[in-house]
Image: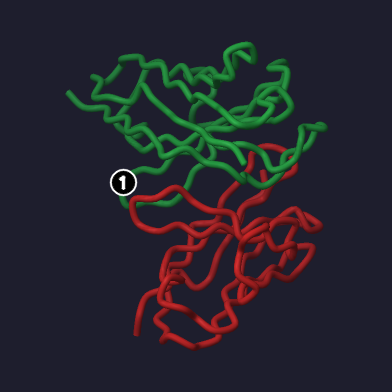
Amino acid sequence: EGHLLESGGSLVQPGGSLRLSCAASEFTFSNYAMSWVRQAPGKGLEWVSSIGGTGGDTYYADSVKGRFTISRDNSMNTLYLQLNNLGAEDTAVYYCAKDLFPFNGRFDAFDIWGQGTMVTVSS
Amino acid sequence: DIQMTQSPSSLSASVGDRVTFTCRASQSISTSLNWYQQKPGKAPKVLIYDASTLQSGVPSRFSGSGSGTDFSLTISSLQPEDFATYYCQYTYKTPLTFGQGTKVEIK
């Protein structure tokens, strides 16, 4: 069915940077769009960023545009999220998620999620 | 950008109850609407996609309906494992907006 495992979350100071990774297994990674979704403590889900199957199409929420960069390495079956200029508002659990259907230019429901990795921005 | 508004924000119900909650889009989204269930400390799980298609493995007591701007998720007979928070989400084109969630609590 597929499996996702995030890593890279940690405590970072305001203004700092971090790179999150999401290792995929048991599905043909390059066929699917992938996304990052975050959840601040006690809050709801917030879509952060998505990337098409080849990596050529990237999309961002306004709240992270210009600070976060999504990328993927299909040879390594890994999704990344580079987080720069972090602020307290970025404190959250970050989930990676897979689209339900192979990418054809539109996005679908997220059928596989990782367990999440915690990013805490604090001095 | 499309905004998604869920109601109510929380509800109390008993095991065996039929419960329905709604999600409204700020503009027509056809049937590009998904429902997720999230339990504390866990990743969300997709229940319904394309407004009314039950995801494989999800119990048939869950059903979704709607199109355009108004959508609903119904649980026909609430089970103990169904107490959770439910989110709707628009997916087709970005931003892939989530609603703010409906928390289902035990009465």
Q: Residue at x 36, y 43 (%)?
A: A40
Q: Position of residue A32 (x, y in %)?
A: 70, 30
B25 relative to A45 in the view: left or right: right
- Tell me if B87 is positioned left or right of A99 in this view: left
Residue type at mark 1: give it: Pro
- Name the residue at 73% across, 18% down: A54
Residue B15 is drawn in which quadrant? bottom left
Tell me which chain the residue with mark 1 is part of. Answer: A
Check the picture and name the quadrant holding the C terminus of chain A.
top left
Crowding around mark 1 (Cα neighbors within 10 Å: few <14, some 14 to 19, many 20+) is: few
Colour red, chain: B
Q: Where does label 1 land, which residue?
A: A41
Residue A53 in percent (x, y) is at: 72, 23
Give me the chain that's green. Answer: A
All told, the count of numbered labels is 1
> What x and y, as percent, mark residue B41?
34, 51
Say above or below: A25 vs B99. above
Element assignment for label 1: loop
